[in-house]
Image (cartoon, helix red, strand yellow):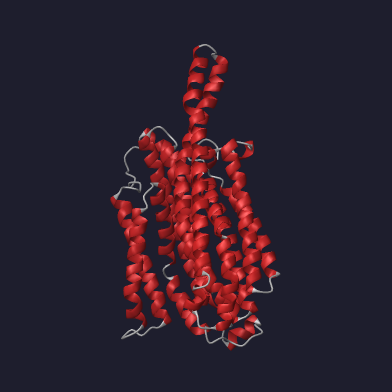
Amino acid sequence: ALGTCTSIFHLSYNSFRATTTATTSLVATALAQDVDDEENHKEAKVVTATSLKFGVMIGIIVSLILWIGNDVILHAMGVPPPSSLHKTLKHPHPSSPLYSPATSYIRYRSLAAPAVLLITVAEGAFRGYANTKIPLLASAVAALANIILDPILMFGKCDMGVSGAALATAFSQYGAAFVYLFFLFRRNMLPSSPTKTTKSKSQIILSRKKRNILKTILRANLAMFTKQGSLLVGWAYATRRAAQLGPDHVAAHQVALSLWLVFALIMDGVAVAAQVIMSTTWSLFVRSRDDDEMLNQEGEKKEGVMQDALEEKNDSSSSPSRCEVRSLTHYMTNASLLQGLLSTLILLYLSNIVPFLTTNDISVQKHLLQILPHVSRQQILVSLTLVWESLVIGGGYFTLLACGTLSSSLLAVWKIGLAGSIEEIWSGGIVVLFLGRLVTAFVGVLDMYFGLFDFMKGGSNRNGLNGKGG
């Protein structure tokens, strides 16, 4: 029951991890886009507050969907409902003994959906401020609360079993949400309540920008939802295909996926750093480029003194900014290759150990021995993809990544559907998924590096945070 429910929540919640990515980029861009630091912080606060409201609203919707539609969701994941509903859904298989505990788990844990979405947005906001200590603290609080509450609610006087595990997780997630809210208010990262007094000129200008900011948030989040959602559908289909192949196949798949996820999360640290630094660097470059364009226009009218100012501006600002983008790309690419190589070596060593540590089933061990070498060899591909995508997100190429990931996921689903074994799923479909994402990210990196495609340019203008375009 826990295995099926974990996959459901992985799909339900992690599809909205996109809000972390989008919020990080938007907040970092807001903080770097103008010369006036005070105005930058005001806009960053508006972005944070608007994203938090948006996240909580989505969380309530997700909670209702999971609570009301858990029967249909479990049915879709291969856990047949009781006979009465089974006839309605025309399911060809008898009901599953996993259905009752799985239903309880989903309903209890779904209560934490608003907290989970608040956590994802708040984490992105702190990342945008280049603060990773508070997310670490919140995660530690959640983990500690879960460790304490799990045995209390699952066993002893409560004896709630699987439902207790769900409640423990839900309470721990609300604990993490409280930590984020506490520091959001303490560090003045949210806008102050509006007063009834006459608005100042700056307040009027900021209120006018809110519409652009809201559009930007919706557009960025929609693109990232599309990206993350299509990616998770690809993973979910891989799990479904493994389940169709047999219980030993899906068991091996889950072990391999868990191990893969551990290394992916470790490598994501470099990707997060790449996104935050690139968001700031790219915004400064775009601001410098926009200033150059203004000087160009004025220089055509006043060629005397203005031309000298133009040359001085171009020499001092524009070229170094582009060089900084290129230098950052070089550095992060090298870091991604290095960590990918290290992960490959570690996993190759573990591939002969993990199968015997995780299960006593000979059939599952056999499948793990076949697929773990493939998981190991994919690490450089995965690392480079994560880092390049983060660099491109830092440049605001949300739509490009959404379209590329959607196309890659569709190709991967097609490839996985043809797989006749768990080994073919990992050596074929998963590789196709990441190759497609890598090619898409490479297009964005090329544009940032050389400025090849005019229609893709825009930086912070593309984000619409400074009111120029969108």
Question: Foreground residue, 275 or 57?
Answer: 275
Quarter holding residue 414: bottom right
Spot occupied by residue 38 in the image (x, y as percentages of width and height):
35, 37
User: Is residue 203 depicted above or below 222 in this figure?
Assistant: above
Determine the residue located farthest toward the top in the rendered image: 304
Spot occupied by residue 286 in the image (x, y as percentages of width and height):
51, 34
Question: Foreground residue, 322 or 127?
Answer: 322
Spot occupied by residue 308 in the image (x, y as percentages of width and height):
50, 15
Determine the residue located farthest toward the right in the rendered image: 418
Spot occupied by residue 305 in the image (x, y as percentages of width and height):
49, 12
Say how many tags the image has. Answer: 0
| Residue 79 visible to an observer of this rendering | no
Q: What residue is drawn where x is 46% and y is 39%?
A: 281
Q: What residue is drawn where x is 45% and y is 71%?
A: 110
| Residue 67 visible to an observer of this rendering | yes
Left or right side of 96 for 101:
left
Left or right side of 331 for 371:
right
Question: Foreground residue, 388 or 197?
Answer: 388
Q: What residue is drawn where x is 34% and y is 63%?
A: 140
Quarter holding residue 421: bottom right
Q: Quadrant of the C terminus?
A: top right
